């Protein structure tokens, strides 16, 4: 059986916590569909694409095994887990219960002086969309939303949402990019900050409902606003 071709992945470079950087890059590649559900990938092949040795890739993949994103295949590598339509519906439903009301609640506690840094995080999402960097888009989106939720000062909530977001599949990102709609969706993050800066909790909550609807509907390949 010939090895499965590995898609082009951005190198992770020399970072202080290499294992974490590799894990984040692989997680983003899985969520975006660059690493395809049901396919087995070897650590050496992934390491060659990332510019690192197979050892930290295996270590990072073991983290993703715990998260339920991959399944080890003895002497072969790691198989990307598949998500059913029902799974995606249920993930979106739980996220809708948690994220919009949490964003509503943190609007009043986010310091005004933090807004410029949050704008920088939001712009990183827009920049990745404009460059067609889907893996970078997923990573930037992940950082932005978890930073916002962090203002709740509830680490258990952040951990739950981190897991839910990691399980999400955004297999519709490529056609979204090709149609030009990814940039418009990315711009929603600045719109969300507009509501936060204006101290409008209701507006921020409603936008988060719409944003998560995109994830399940348009991004995941179904009808927009499906949840």
Image: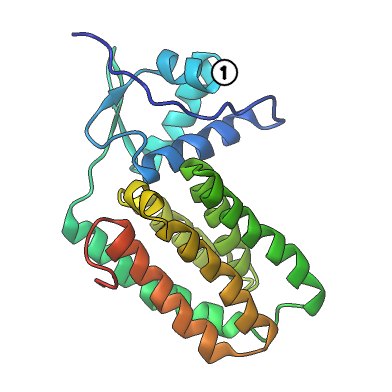
- In depth, the one of 7 and 77 nearer the eye is 7
Q: Is residue 163 above or below residue 59?
A: below
Q: Position of residue 61 (x, y in %)?
A: 43, 30
Quarter of the image with the C terminus is: bottom left
Q: Is residue 2 above or below residue 224?
A: above
Q: Residue at x 25, y 56 (%)?
A: 221
| Residue holding disc 1 | 51
Q: Residue furthest right?
A: 113
Q: Residue furthest front?
A: 179
Q: Is residue 213 above or below residue 40?
A: below
Q: Position of residue 184 (x, y in %)?
A: 48, 65
Q: Position of residue 112 (x, y in %)?
A: 78, 79
Q: Position of residue 8 (x, y in %)?
A: 44, 26
Give the number of callouts: 1
Q: Residues within 10 Å of mark 1 (few under 14, many from 20)?
A: some
Q: Is residue 92 above or below residue 38?
A: below
Quarter of the image with the N terminus is: top left
- In depth, the one of 116 and 162 nearer the eye is 116
SS of the residue under disc 1 = loop
The quarter of the displayed image where residue 90 is located: bottom left
């Amino acid at each position: 059986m010939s090895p499965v071709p590995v898609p082009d992945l951005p190198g992770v470079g020399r970072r202080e916590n290499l294992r974490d950087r590799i894990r984040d890059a692989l997680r983003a590649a899985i969520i975006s569909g660059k690493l395809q559900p049901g396919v087995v990938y070897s650590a050496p092949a992934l390491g060659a694409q990332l510019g690192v040795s197979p050892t930290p890739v295996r270590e990072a993949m073991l983290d993703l095994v715990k998260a339920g994103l991959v399944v080890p295949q003895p002497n072969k590598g790691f198989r990307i887990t598949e998500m059913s339509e029902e799974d995606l519906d249920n993930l979106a439903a739980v996220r809708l219960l948690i994220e919009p009301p949490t964003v509503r609640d943190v609007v009043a506690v986010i310091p005004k002086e933090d807004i410029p840094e949050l704008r920088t995080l939001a712009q990183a999402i827009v920049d990745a969309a404009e460059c067609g960097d889907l893996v970078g888009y997923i990573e930037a989106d992940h950082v932005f939303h978890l930073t916002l939720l962090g203002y709740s000062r509830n680490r258990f909530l952040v951990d739950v949402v981190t897991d839910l977001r990691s399980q999400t599949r955004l297999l519709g990102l490529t056609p979204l990019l090709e149609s030009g709609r990814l940039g418009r969706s990315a711009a929603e993050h600045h719109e969300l900050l507009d509501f936060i800066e204006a101290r409008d909790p209701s507006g921020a909550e409603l936008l988060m409902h719409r944003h998560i609807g995109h994830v399940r509907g348009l991004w995941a390949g179904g009808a927009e606003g499906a949840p």
